[in-house]
Amino acid sequence: MNICGLGVSGSYLFKRLSDLGFKVNAFDVKRSDYYIPCGYATNERKIEEYCKRVGINFDDYVLTRAENVIVAGDNFAEHTFNSSGLCTFDKNRFEHDLVKDLTAMKKPPDYNNGISLDCSGISRALLGQSPDDYSMSAIEYLSNKAEHKTFYFKFYGKAMGYFWEFPMGNQFHVGAGGLDQGDNLKRIEPYQKILVTGRKIRLKPLFENMYRENVIGIGEAIGCVSPITGEGIIPSLESADLFIECARRYDDVHDLFEKYAGKIRKEFGRYYGLHRLVNNLQEGRTLTVNNLRFARAALNEFREFGVDITAPSVLSHFIMPKKQN
Ligand SMILES: Cc1cc2nc3c(=O)[nH]c(=O)nc-3n(C[C@H](O)[C@H](O)[C@H](O)COP(=O)(O)OP(=O)(O)OC[C@H]3O[C@@H](n4cnc5c(N)ncnc54)[C@H](O)[C@@H]3O)c2cc1C
């Protein structure tokens, strides 16, 4: 097998598939000192189970555990919630350590030979672009200062994106992700910066474009990212595990790809409705029964991420946005 991209899903797969006895060629284009553009926030109660499978003690990577989490919006007042596992961790070291005992290739393998896994995230380097793709721009600073001492999310009106401050030990990640990169820049500009990073983030399931010929997509390449929170680390690991489960059972490539695709659609099917919800809010479409249903599911996305959201006022943000001036 070949792995294109050693981000979170590719590194995890490289390690697990090698441990399981598969012969794997893996390659990534990034430089060794590359600082990964990501908030580095995850739910430690969930990521621990993946770490156990690769012999990693997640505790060693935790930078800050959230005690509470502030959620605010352009359209609603600030609320403080309990954390249900939200933390930041050293993602650069984590990805490095996943593959430290393995040898990645210095140049791309022959992706036409055998099964190739597209783990290249936003790039879809092997699968190619999908005509119905949807992404937002994001920019992030590593900073010595933030306005809040705890984890902070601020949602833009009309579901156009969000701003975050995540404590990282004695530093912070301050970021802004949204459709309008000018607006993102305005929100983040006042902050002090040690370094600047950013990229687009895919916020739509591409589950109709998951594979072609001998290539199958994993993680953000196929849209395993929550359309509400932008959480992509655990969904990418989850998709990697679904692939492993199928690779161990099915020798025939067609069967393997079909079964995996079915599992992804089942596990992440809610992303279709959540993406539609975001789209409805952006277009200013008013309350529908479906919005209500998916608004509840939207709050659940926060719980998945590790924020114990309960407030109805936040729910209303996901049903019917107030008119913008
Ligand atoms: C600014 C920002 C903040 C985010 N914050 C969070 C967060 O706090 N928590 C969270 O859960 N999620 C967050 N996400 C989402 C999360 O980072 C991703 O969804 C997740 O890392 C995707 O994992 P992946 O393995 O699919 O792809 P990635 O981790 O993106 O890895 C893709 C890899 O492919 C490599 N690659 C690209 N093209 C090629 C090529 N042609 N050949 C070889 N290699 C290639 C890249 O160098 C990269 O290493 C954030 C995303 C962004 C942009």
Image: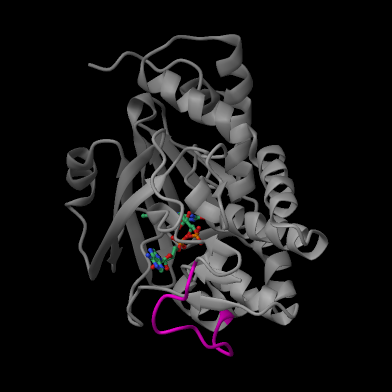
Say whether residue 194 is left or right of residue 114. Answer: left
Quadrant of residue 291 within the rendered picture: top right
Say whether residue 131 is left or right of residue 10. Answer: left
Q: Is residue 85 above or below residue 32?
A: above
Front position in the image: 149 or 294? 294
Whether residue 311 appears in this view of the structure is: no
Residue at point 63%, 30% (across, down): 297
Residue at point 37%, 41% (across, down): 135
Is 105 magenta? The answer is yes
Q: If the image is split into quadrants, where does the C terminus sit?
A: top left
Point out the quarter of the image occupied by ligand 1.
bottom left
Main SS class of the magenta portion in the image: loop
Residue 160: give x, y in percent of width and height.
34, 31
Residue 24: give x, y in percent of width and height.
61, 77
Is 208 magenta? The answer is no
Front position in the image: 76 or 103? 103
- Color style of the picture: one colour
Q: Is residue 256 above or below residue 26?
A: above
Whether residue 216 appears in this view of the structure is: yes
Front position in the image: 295 or 101? 101
Q: How many numbered marks appear?
A: 0
Residue 168: give x, y in percent of width and height.
43, 68
- Give the farthest residue toward the right: 249
Q: Is residue 204 above or below residue 43?
A: above
Residue at point 60%, 75% (across, down): 14
Residue 256: give x, y in percent of width and height.
72, 54
Q: If the image is split into quadrants, where does the N terminus sit?
A: bottom right
Residue at point 39%, 80% (across, down): 107
Magenta segment range?
98-111
Quadrant of residue 197 within the rendered picture: bottom left
